[in-house]
Amino acid sequence: MRDIALTVVILGLLPFVLRRPHWGVLLWACIGIASPHRLTFGFANDLPWAAIAGATTLIAILLCREPKRLPLAAPVVALLLFLGWTTVTSMFSVFPGDAWDAWQDLLKTQLFVLVTLLMMQTRERIKALVWVIALALGFYGVKGGLYTLAQGGGGMVVGPQNSYIEGNTEIALALTMTIPLMYWLKRNTEGRWIRRALVAGMLLTTIAILGSYSRGGLVAIAAMTAFFWLQSRTKIGVTVFLVLLVPALLAIMPGGWFDRMRTIQTYNKDESARGRIAAWNFAKDLAADRPMVGGGFRVFQPEAYFRWAKQRPTEMFDAHSIWFEVLGNHGYFGLGLFVLMWGLCWRTAIRIRRLTEGHTELWWAADLARLTLVSLIGYWVGGSFLGLAYWDFPYVLMALLVLTLTVVSKQVAATSTGGAAPVGVPIAALRSRPQGQS
């Protein structure tokens, strides 16, 4: 039944995508980030839904007469340079066949990011994209939160099988990164009941993160909360809220959860943690021998470990860190481009907030930049313990920042010259709210 329902919904949307290409971006985002087809158990599970949505969207873009221009902001340029370097490293890969397969997968992901940048350059479309992400991943948060409550904190929340967010730590990171977007929607929605539903969704999502039993998820949400507190102008209010909320949430969890979280302090005795450290050391050993090009995509394999690793892990072979994954795959130069790309995202968020100073009608953009940066903090910290360097979601957040900068730049330029506001940014319809409000 799930297979039929999913098929009817997706195929039913395709005619609308042909008329409105940005709908295709939204459909593509939902499928790529949340993998709803992995919740089915029949024929729909293995169908290439992302490819179907993507191909339809590309056809729609070719037929669409709407002006299209790729915003070449600094993070986008860095991304293109990084993609170019991955092409070079694939030529010198230790495992060429695997490397080129992974390279093609990465290009498919980044094609979606570029299409997003091309087609979502209005405030309404940006907000629609945030809604799709929040609803798609928030579904797992609400479902996981209810499951955790029903199990008295004893179950373990995991993601859909055969997806980027399959494991408990992966789904915990995805949900952690979703909470700031849900919060932004709550602050940018007029409907009282919708706002209440978003608050309930955030609470259940937080419970689901705890219910994942992920130590990396706990570290990521702690880092996000600390950054959010530092950015807040109402630190006392936020502090009181956290003092009341955190003990209430922790009271739900059983003793086994606290036992697992305490192993963060004794990582040197934990087999999983030792495996991570061994993987990171392998990446450094490999990069010491091949500093410029690394080993190429999918180099974290037994044969490579036996050749380069001085300390061999006893468990699975995985990078266990976005930073060491890129270092092992693409060498120090590739890692430098990767770090530069995310550093430029930080700078873009700061630039948006500076551009919007004195423009109360653009408070939504400053707020989105701040909260998107909070999500990325979660990715950078939580991703330090996961091999998710090529996952769609953080690159979509990068696109959100660039799109927001594009809209803000046009609006500020139009305001300063006395011109009309760009199409899709109806100033009169926006609520005024002080910037930086928490």
Image (cartoon, rainbow, N blue to C red):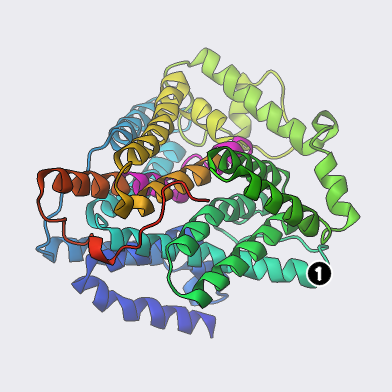
Work out which quarter of the rendered image holds the N terminus and state it: bottom right
User: Which residue is depicted at the point 12% across and 61% down?
Assistant: 66
Residue 199 screen position, x and y as percent? 59, 66
Residue at (32% x, 77% y) in the render: 13
Magenta range is 378-402
Verify whether residue 73 appears in magenta. Answer: no
Can residue 387 be seen here? The reply is no
Badge 1 is on which residue? 151
Observer-nearest of 362 and 48: 362
The x, y position of residue 269, in whole percent, is 85, 31
Judge the density around disc 1: few (<14), some (14-19), many (≥20) Cα neighbours within 10 Å. some
Q: Nearer the viewer, residue 106 or 431?
A: 431
Residue type at numbered disc 1: Gln
On the image, the x and y values in percent for residue 395 come to 41, 45
Compared with residue 36, is residue 183 higher up or lower down, i.e. above or below?
Answer: above
On the picture, is 268 further left or further right than 4? right
